[in-house]
Amino acid sequence: MIKSHPLTSKTLSIPNIGAAAAAALAIITLTLLIVTHAATQVPMTEAEVAVRDQTSVIDDPQASAGQALLFGSAAGVPTDPGGGDDDGEPTDPGGVPVEPQQPGKLFLGAAVEPDQLSNPQFTSTLEQYKFTSLTAENAMKFGQLQPNQGQFNWGGADAIVNYAQSKGMRVRGHTLIWHRDVPGWVNGLSSEQAATALKTHIQQVMGRYKGKIAQWDVANEVFNDDGTLRDTVWLQKLGNDYLAQAYTWAHEADPSAQLYYNDYSAESGESGGSQAKVDAVYNMVKSLKERGVPIHGVGLQMHAQGGYPGSGNAIKANMQRLGTLGVKAELTELDIVDVADQAGRYAEYGRACKEAGNCTAVTTWGLYDGHTWRPGMNPLLFDGNFQPKPAYEALTQAMGL
Ligand code: XIL
């Protein structure tokens, strides 16, 4: 089934030039960012920029009005949760693989929709090839799980978790906080009610899958390209310290889960990526760690097109820099639009993960070209008939699988 994505039909703006301030440490780095596509780069077309910027510009026209990121102590957020689980290492996974069975072996993942798991061609491809991890492409987003306050739809998420368990595959939970897929009822809440609603959502969702979902994207895409916090309903209602609160609640809900932050344009500062965003993510993780707020990893989305999101070496260096903070990294949503050397690009990014030292998985955003959020671009490892493309062999070999 080919799904069209709303962004393909919307008017786009091109935010390649951004400037904003954010301070270091307690206040993140003050950076004046001018992102230009230098002569050495393949210029991005409007469609490419759309893919790069995905949801933000389109869904959130005020995105650039973000605020400076402040991670001061907030009431209710302990500065040191005191547990032994905040050291970046996973704890009791409850029987579900959290780390590769063989030390150093990377997970290969795919994003899936629940209905795909009743297609035998789909599942036999997952099972015949080297997939060991699944992400819900949509089924675990806020609005999918709790469309009305207090009314949870578990069917799709359950189907993915049950299938993964039956095959011994790991699950990445995606995502508790996002500016998209926020149901309308959230808008009507007071600040206090919104905080309670988010906490309840995290408790319900992570509680249901406690020990079954190895890692969660607690927050997804909360930064603007200039490194400031995106102006979202969660920021507006909960305030600047909402990430510290959310990660603390998430850790309480399932102490065995690895807590990730996930974003795009934060893979590297090269080729249309944003160094300001790379730094904002780094500084946010550093600040949370310094305060004892549990965070264990960073997901780099990797929706590649043209030179974006940078060379394997630049991405590897970014992951290693995050590693100095004691966190892991994963390539969480990799897809590479059909280019002459698609296999070579897949190999380059697989190698970056293999060599980084703290990178534990590569997940592709879909399994086969018959179902992708980038329709017509053939960005995945299997073709429309579930046949492996050269990219599959290239990626798995580079990952050492
Ligand atoms: C996309 C899904 O693939 C689409 O089916 C849906 O319509 C919109 O969301 N970054 C993310 C993912 O973090 O959740 C997005 O997934 C793709 C971009």
Image: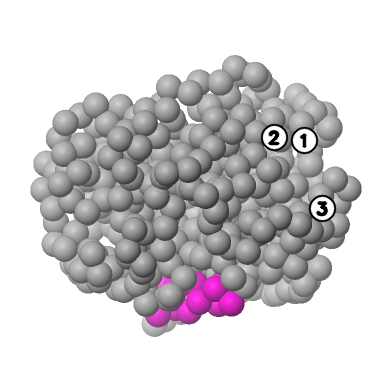
Q: Quadrant of the C terminus?
A: bottom left
| Residue type at numbered disc 3 | Pro
Q: Which residue is mark 1?
A: 195
- The front one of 123 and 279 is 123
x and y percent of residue 22 in the render?
Answer: 76, 68
**Tag nearer the camera, 2 or 3:** 3
Q: Which residue is mark 2?
A: 198
Q: Real-space Cα distance between discs 2 and 3?
A: 18 Å
Q: Is residue 284 left or right of residue 4?
A: right
> Is residue 277 visible in this depiction of the protein?
no
| Residue type at numbered disc 1 | Ala
Q: Mark 2 and mark 3 in contact? Answer it, CB < 8 Å.
A: no
Q: Mark 1 and mark 2 in contact? Answer it, CB < 8 Å.
A: yes
Residue 173 vertical placement versus 143 (above, below): below
Q: Look at the image and give the residue range highlighted in magenta.
A: 306-324
Q: How is the image coloured?
A: one colour
**Tag nearer the camera, 1 or 3:** 3
Q: Earlier in the sequence, mark 1 or mark 3?
A: 3
Q: Is residue 197 left or right of residue 179?
A: right
Q: Quadrant of the N terminus?
A: top left
Q: Mark 1 and mark 3 in contact? Answer it, CB < 8 Å.
A: no
| Residue type at numbered disc 2 | Leu
- The front one of 18 and 232 is 232
Q: Earlier in the sequence, mark 2 or mark 3?
A: 3
Q: Secondary structure at mark 1?
A: helix
Q: Secondary structure at mark 2?
A: helix
> Is residue 96 visible in this depiction of the protein?
yes
Q: Is residue 339 left or right of residue 263?
A: left
Residue at figure coordinates x 35%, y 48% from the top left: 133
Q: Which residue is mark 3?
A: 78
Q: Secondary structure at mark 3?
A: loop
